[in-house]
Amino acid sequence: MPNKKPLKPKNIFGEHKYKIGVSGAAEIGCCSPGATRLAEEVGKEIVRQGCILLTGATTGIPHFAAKGAKAAGGVSIGFSPAGSKKEHVNTYKLPVDFCDLIVYTGFDYVGRDLILTKSADGVIIICGRTGTLHEFTVAFETKTPVGVLQGSGGTADLIEPVLAKGYRPNTKIVYDTDPKKLVAKLIKAIKTNN
């Protein structure tokens, strides 16, 4: 019988440095003008800098980040609050495009936020509302590096002033107004964290 070499599993996602989650407003009314363009650019930069994008598989800012990641030829993984594709689309009214894979958590938004944030090596905050604040808090409490896109509106523009008031400082938070520089700073913070 001939010697057979064991099959080596194919890595369908390729070689990537890190998994970076993007958190932001699903409804963009609180965002600054141009925030969706910036989100798309962040998605592209995550891919250009060799990482995989994670989102909440939702509308608004995360959707634009996923669109950017796919435009750059990258991998985008979504974490849904729903327990199935049918529930994701029909009950939550969420999109399925721009994701290579959607994990249907079945844990509503609160549980989804926790799983998404804990699955990421780092998180980028763009604009945002209360759900984004929740994801930021999970990352902050678990000492996950966070990048904040300043000037994007909503929660993103509140984080630095709140932390500057003397609340527990966290050196694993980086800030920038430029998507390329922000992603690079976050990757550096992730490397330091590992």
Image (cartoon, grey):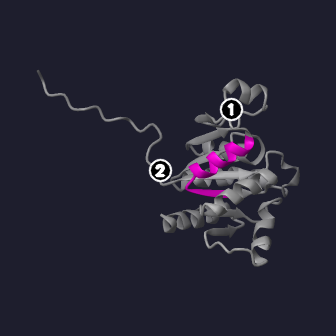
- The percent coordinates of residue 76 (x first, y second) are 59, 42
For residue 107, side relative to residue 12 (left or right): right
- Number of labels in the image equals 2
Name the mark on residue 96.
1
Name the mark on residue 28.
none
To which residue does mark 2 refer?
A: 16
Looking at this view, name the residue that lies furthest to the top.
1
Quarter assignment of residue 84: top right
For residue 112, side relative to residue 161 (left or right): left
The residue depicted at 14 percent of the width and 28 percent of the height is 3
- Between the C-alphas of marks 1 and 2, the distance is 23 Å
Given the image, on which type of amino acid does mark 1 rest? Val
Given the image, on which type of amino acid does mark 2 rest? His
Rate crowding at label 2 as few (under 14), some (14 to 19) or many (20 or more) other CA atoms within 10 Å: few
Q: Does the segment drawn in magenta span residue 112?
A: yes
Residue range corresponding to the magenta coloring: 109-124
Quarter assignment of residue 155: bottom right
Quadrant (top left, top right, bottom left, bottom right) of the N terminus: top left
**Against 118, is 63 above or below?**
above
- The percent coordinates of residue 135 (x first, y second) are 70, 54
**Against 33, is 5 above or below?**
above
- The percent coordinates of residue 5 (x first, y second) are 21, 32
For residue 149, side relative to residue 15 (left or right): right
- The percent coordinates of residue 31 (x first, y second) are 84, 55
Residue 191 or 35: which is nearer the viewer? 191
The residue depicted at 53 percent of the width and 63 percent of the height is 190
For residue 45, side relative to residue 3 (left or right): right
